[in-house]
Image (tube, helix red, strand yellow):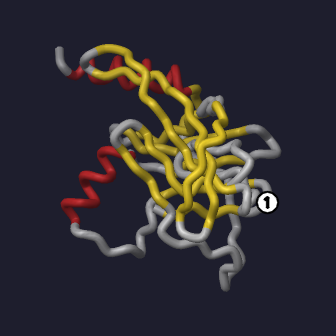
Amino acid sequence: FKLRFDNKKSIFKEDKTLKIEDREIDFIKILIGKGAFYTDISANKIVLQKDSFGELFLINIPKVEWNLTQEIKKIGKYTCYKATSKKEVENRRGKHLKKITAWYTPELPISYGPKNYSGLPGLILELEEGELLYRASKINLSPKKNTQIKEPTKGKKMTLKEYNRSIKKLITDSKR
């Protein structure tokens, strides 16, 4: 996966150029999900463009509320600070809170990170989302080609709650 960004917008999506074992990619796609996470900080907007059951959706994702700590660790050459949050998830066993831990560096004062995680006073270099761990493996702050970040426009627009309700209904209806 790659995070591309400029001063106002970012996009986090699968990097089609990377070669990984097909089985590993399928497992990763199941855990992370297919789609593109678009963030526009100036418009205070996070959108996930996602293909589910053959239909394309544009899902408005709520902003993450972070708790900043003074805990520090080094990631590569960067001094990082810990921020935590929780998100409610629902599965077969019901609703529960998933712990989110981000390590960000103010040395790169860019408020982005993997998926829909943004809004910290520095780039997120490591993020734990429950059992999943995202870690920056390479940072290129001056790419050779101009990065253009375009907002996804194709898909049925809805909130995350509406999307979750419709998917739950599709699954329930398909079991009948």
Which residue is under mark 1?
Answer: 7
Q: Position of residue 151 (x, y in %)?
A: 67, 52
Q: Quadrant of the N terminus?
A: bottom left
Q: Is residue 172 visible?
A: yes
Residue most extreme to the bottom: 144
Relative to 28, 153 lies left or right: right
Q: Is residue 130 above or below residue 144?
A: above
For image coordinates 22% across by 22% down, the residue present is: 174
Type of amino acid under label 1: Asn
Q: Quadrant of the C terminus?
A: top left
For image coordinates 25% across by 55% down, the residue present is: 26
Q: Is residue 112 above or below residue 141?
A: above
Relative to 129, 110 lies left or right: right
Q: Residues within 10 Å of mark 1 (few under 14, many from 20)?
A: few
Residue most extreme to the right: 42
Q: Position of residue 29 (x, y in %)?
A: 33, 51
SS under mark 1: loop
Instruction: Name the foreground residue: 28 vs 96.
Output: 96
For image coordinates 61% across by 33% down, the residue present is: 60
Q: Is residue 176 above or below residue 112?
A: above
How many circles with numbers are drawn on the protein?
1
Relative to 165, 92 lies left or right: left
Q: Position of residue 28 (x, y in %)?
A: 31, 53
Question: In the figure, residue 17 lies in which quadrant?
Answer: bottom left
Q: Is residue 152 visible?
A: no
For image coordinates 60% across by 43% down, the residue present is: 71
Instruction: Name the foreground residue: 53 vs 111.
Output: 111
Relative to 122, 140 lies left or right: left
Q: Position of residue 27 (x, y in %)?
A: 25, 52
Question: In the figure, residue 47 lies in which quadrant?
Answer: top right
